[in-house]
Structures are given as C-alpha cells and as structure tokens.
Amino acid sequence: MIKQIFSDMDGTLLNEKGFISEGNIQAIKACGIPFTLVSARAPMEMFDTIDKLGLKSAQIAFNGGLIYKRKGDSIVKITENPMITDIVQNIVLNIRKQFNDISLSLYTDTKWYTDQIDDGIQLETSLTFHHPDIVDYPEFLKTTDEDIYKIMFIATTDDEMNTILKALDNLHLSGVSIQQSGNRYLEITSDKAKKSRGIRYIQELNNLEKSDMAAFGDGHNDIPMLTMVDTPIIMENAMDEVKRYAVHITKTNDEDGVAYGIQNFLGV
C-alpha cells in the first residue's frame, strides 16, 4: 500500500502553461495519500501549487538543496545545502565572459536574479509568473552575502545546450551537481543537493519503506528520486532514457497524467 507520493512539478504535475489542472488537484486530494513536491524550482515558485493542494508538510526545492515548510509568505528551513560562493563566482563569471547572450540566472531562497532579459527569462516568467531582479553579476557576486542555491541556464537550441555543457566541462568543476531538466533547462546546485536526499528525509521522518513510496517524474534530474521508490511512474512526455526507470508510464502532463497514475496505478 502506498503511503507517500512524491512528484516533480514542471513537465509532470504542471501542464505546459505552468498550471496545475483541476483534475490533478481533485485526484490528489481525493486519494488521501500524503503528497510532497520535489522540484528544481525555488520555494516562491512552488507556493501557488502548495496552496491549491493545501499542503502543510515539508516540501523539497532546488533538487533537494532546500527542504522547507511554508509559513505565510515566507518559509521555515529544515535542511539546506547552498552552493559554495567561490564555485558560483567561477561558473558565472567565466561563462558570462565567454558568452554574452546565454540565458543565465541565480537563485537564493527568496530571490531570482539575472543580468538581462532574454528569451529564456521571458519563457521562465511565463511559466512561473515571477520576475527576476536585474543585477550586474561581477558587482553582485562581490558584494552579496546571500546564499545561492541554484544556477540555471535556459538554452534555445540543442546546439546551445551542448555549448554550455562543453564550457562547464572545461571548468573542471567539483562540488556541484549539473543536471538537465527537459531539453532546454540546465541546473547547477551543490553536489549535496539531490532529489534523493529530500526523499530520504521524508522517508526517515515518517518511517517509510521503499515499497511504501511512489514518485512521478519526467526529467533527468528526477532519476535520483525515481530510484528511491518501488513505484516510479513516468510521464508519457518524458525522455526515452528516463522512461527506462518506469514501473508504470502514465499520460502526459497536459492530460492530467498524475491524476491518471494515482487512479490507475496506485489502487486508490
């Protein structure tokens, strides 16, 4: 019997316009199983979904880099693994020196920063309904005392994604986790930030067995989460390499795939 459900957001729980459907909301509420969001998103970008589902328990942001509970318009941090400042500076300043037009963002626990409004930023704004603060990266990184939890690149083409990956590889980085989410997003967090760590926290908190847990996902960054549960359910819109981890394949995120999975694969 499933006692805990975990779910990615973008490409999974949310449709292509960035909304959670009424069908998914009703199925999640009706099943009566505790439900945890496990996302690369920042907490502020998760609040709308948390409210619509009425979630009160711990949620997982930044691919496991921050576990928190919502408290009004702020959060209570439970565990956190921000990036090392020197590593952030190395990545951002070197990449920006090489490429002026690649979409590059930084996230703290409460803020989204970028240095220019480009197609990638406009896309992200349309999906999350949040707007970034514009900063000068060299000055910002020299003066800020804020912890950075995530660096995000948004590529416009496969070639651009490959260019970003090659440039990062040439930096010979350590202490980071580099994961692709969908075809266009590349996210860098601390190497201690993995969705599996967030799952482990919830599992130990609630004394759950692997067989007690199910998870929904679609992207490469979901794989550590999917391997932590006995019932991984993969979206039809997922990449083929992610589908290899499926026990079940459900409908797409535009077809209420999470609701379909709950109703047809979890016995509720």
Image (cartoon, rainbow, N blue to C red):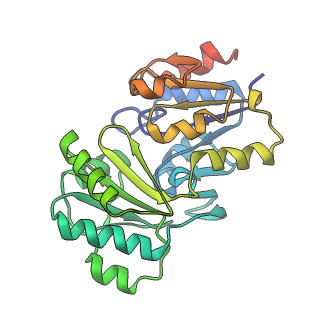
Image coordinates for residue 42, horizontal then vertical, percent: 48, 56
In this view, 181 is above or below 257: below
Image coordinates for residue 48, horizontal then vertical, percent: 49, 48
In this view, 74 is above or below 49: below
In this view, 117 is above or below 1: below
Residue drawn at point x = 32 percent, y = 60 percent: 131
In this view, 238 is above or below 168: above
**Is 178 or 75 nearer to us in this picture?**
178
Quadrant including the N terminus? top right
Tell whether 87 sits left or right of 136. right
**Is 119 or 228 nearer to us in this picture?**
228
Image coordinates for residue 183, horizontal then vertical, percent: 31, 38
Residue drawn at point x = 40 percent, y = 70 percent: 88
Tell whether 155 sits left or right of 64. left
Image coordinates for residue 62, horizontal then vertical, percent: 51, 54
Q: How many marks are shown on the rendered structure?
A: 0
Residue drawn at point x = 36 percent, y = 56 percent: 152
Q: Residue furthest bottom?
A: 143
Q: Is residue 8 visible?
A: no
- Occupied quadrant, residue 81: bottom right
Q: Is residue 199 visible?
A: yes
Quadrant including the C terminus? top right
